[in-house]
Image (spheres, grey):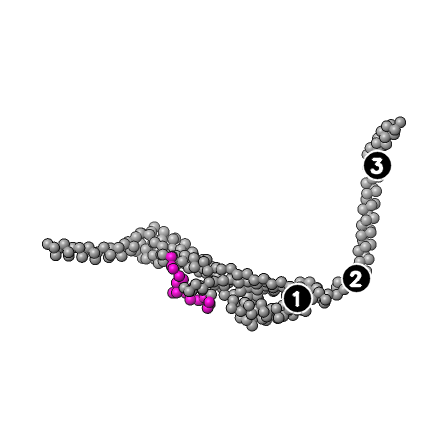
Amino acid sequence: MKRLIIGLGLALLLLVPAACARAPESAPTPMPAPAPSGLPETDEVYKSAGAGALPSEQGERMIVRSGDISLVVTDVTRSRDEIARLAVSLDGYVVSSRIWGEEQDTRGSISIRVPDEKFEQTLAELRSLAVRVTAESTNSRDITEEYVDLGSRLKNAEATESQYLALLEKAGDVDDILNIYERLSRVRSEIEQLKGRMQYLERTASMSLITAQLEPEATARPLVRAGWSALEVLKSAVRGLATAGQFLGTMAIWLVIFIPIWGTILGIILWRRHKRKA
C-alpha cells in the first residue's frame, strides 16, 4: 500500500510540470513576451549597427552630439568648399549649404555630418581654417533609454507576430482567419515602425552634426557699399520731392472743395469769440 501511494505521488510530481509547460500553447490569444534585460544580440537590426553605436551590457551609452561654430574667414566661398571637402575626407557628408550677400559682404552657412569618433577632430580642423572663432557651442543628448525601450517593444511585437502565425495555421473558420490576418497586419506595421525608428537613432548617434557660420573679415569690407551710385541717389531725392509736391497739391484741392464746410465752422468760431470780447 505504501509503495502504491509513493508511486502515485511521483506520478503527480511529473505530470504537474508537464501540464504547466503545455498551458501557454492552449491559450486562445497571444501573450506578449517579457521585456529583455539587455539588447538582443540575434536581431538583424542590432547586428547592422555601427561599432560603438549600441549600448552594451557594460553600460555603454548612445549619445547624439551636435556642435555650432561661428568663423571669421578671409574668403567665405572658398572656406565653404574646404569644409565640404573636409567632411568627405573624414567619411562624412554635407547636409546643407548656403551663401548670401554681395562681393566682400558675402556670408555663408554649412552643416555637415561626420562620424561621432571624429567630432573633436572636425572642430579642431574648422578652427584651423578660420582667422578667428567668434562663437562655439556643443550639445549632447542621451538616447539610450529610448533605444532600449524600442528594443523591448520590438521583441514583444515579434513574439506576438509568431504567436499569431501559429494561430493562423490552426484556424479553420474563415472569420477567424480574417480576424487573425487583420491583427497580424497591425503587428507587422508596428514592427516596421519600431525598426525604422531604431535605425534612425543608430544613424543619428553614429554621425554627429556640426553647423558652421561663415563671415568675412571686417577689415576687408569696402568704405562704399558695392552698387552705390550718386546719380541714383539724386534721382531718388527728386522723386521724393515730386511725391511731396503731389501730396501738398492734393491737400490744397481738398481744402478748396470743402471750404463751405470748414469755412462755416471757422466763421462761427470767430463770431463767438468776437461776441465774448464785446
For the point 39% across and 53% down, the residue is: 182
| Marks 1 and 2, the one that precedes in the sequence | 1
* Vertical arrangement, residue 164 with respect to residue 125, above or below: above
Q: Are circles 2 and 3 on residues that touch, CB within 8 Å?
A: no
Relative to residue 1, is residue 244 drawn left or right? right
State the extent of the magenta-drawn residues as a range.
35-52
Q: Which residue is mark 1?
A: 72
Q: Position of residue 118 (x, y in %)?
A: 53, 69
Q: What label does residue 115 carry, if any?
A: none
Q: Which residue is mark 2?
A: 229
| Mark 1 closeness class: few <14, some 14–19, many ≥20 residues within 10 Å | many
Depth order, front residue of 25/245: 25
Q: Nearer the viewer, mark 3 or mark 1?
A: 1
State which quadrant residue 12 falls in.
Answer: bottom left
Residue 247 visible in this rendered orientation of the protein: yes
Is 48 magenta? The answer is: yes
Depth order, front residue of 181/105: 105
Q: CA distance from mark 2 to mark 3?
A: 46 Å
